[in-house]
Image (tube, helix red, strand yellow):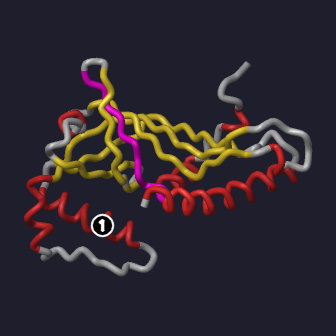
Amino acid sequence: MNYPPKHHQDNDINHMIEVIKTYPLATVISVKDNLPLITHLPLVYEDEKLIGHIDIYNPQTELLKNNNDVTILFGGPQCYISPTIYSTTQLPTWNYIKVHLKGKVKAIESKIALKQSLITMTEFLEAPDHNYVLEPDNPRLDANLNYIEMFEISITHWEGKFKLSQDKNPKDIRLAREELLRANQENIKQFLDKVF
């Protein structure tokens, strides 16, 4: 038996890029002395690479250079799928979209490149309204450049995990899609009401 099932794998790089662009907060994993170091950082996909920034005091910073190996996870929408939403008899399941990447990371030492990258990332994250523009002459930006490390990741392996009830009939696939939309909107509000 093949695992994961082929119908839950999406090898379309364009689909995976859409996940990265829509959900840019990544889980970045490095390994040192057989122990994982994990940081959550927004990454921007640019020219077939991922660009990111990390605080120089983060212990993972030293591993984000020198062509080290890194694993990156991006998560899209996900939710529990009750059998009650289907038009046919099914068992409970969980639907989700995840992208797993592996790559080689190197530090970008240039402060000019770092400054421009922070401006570019802000512009990307502010889209489409661009209510805030990070200006190059912002004194707070200049004051913080010495505390931020820029890095880029060359992607060596792509894996898209799109578990979206593809093994069901067309009507049940559509119902599962509708449930994914409904549950994500409702769950966020209920969660935030409890913790924030």
Is residue 159 toward the left or the right of residue 130 in the image? right
Residue at x 38%, y 78% (from the top left corner): 130
Magenta-highlighted residues: 21-32
In this view, 161 is above or below 23: above
Judged by its main secondary structure, the magenta piece is strand
Figure quadrant of the C terminus: bottom left
Considering every residue shown, the one lying at the far front of the view is 194
Image: 44 above or below 61: below
| Apparent side of residue 163 relative to residue 154 in the rendered image (left or right) | right
Q: Residue 3 at x, y = what percent?
A: 66, 24
Q: Position of residue 115 (x, y in %)?
A: 18, 63
Residue 92 point in image, percent of width and height? 76, 38
| Quadrant of the image containing the N terminus | top right
Residue 24 magenta: yes
Q: Nearer the viewer, residue 110 or 33?
A: 33
Q: How many marks on residues?
A: 1
Snapshot quadrant of residue 93: top right
Q: Amino acid at mark 1?
A: Thr
Q: Nearer the viewer, residue 35 or 190?
A: 190
At x 80% / y 50%, what residue is drawn? 173
| Of the pair 100 and 180, the residue shown nearer to us | 180
Helix, strand or loop status at disc 1: helix
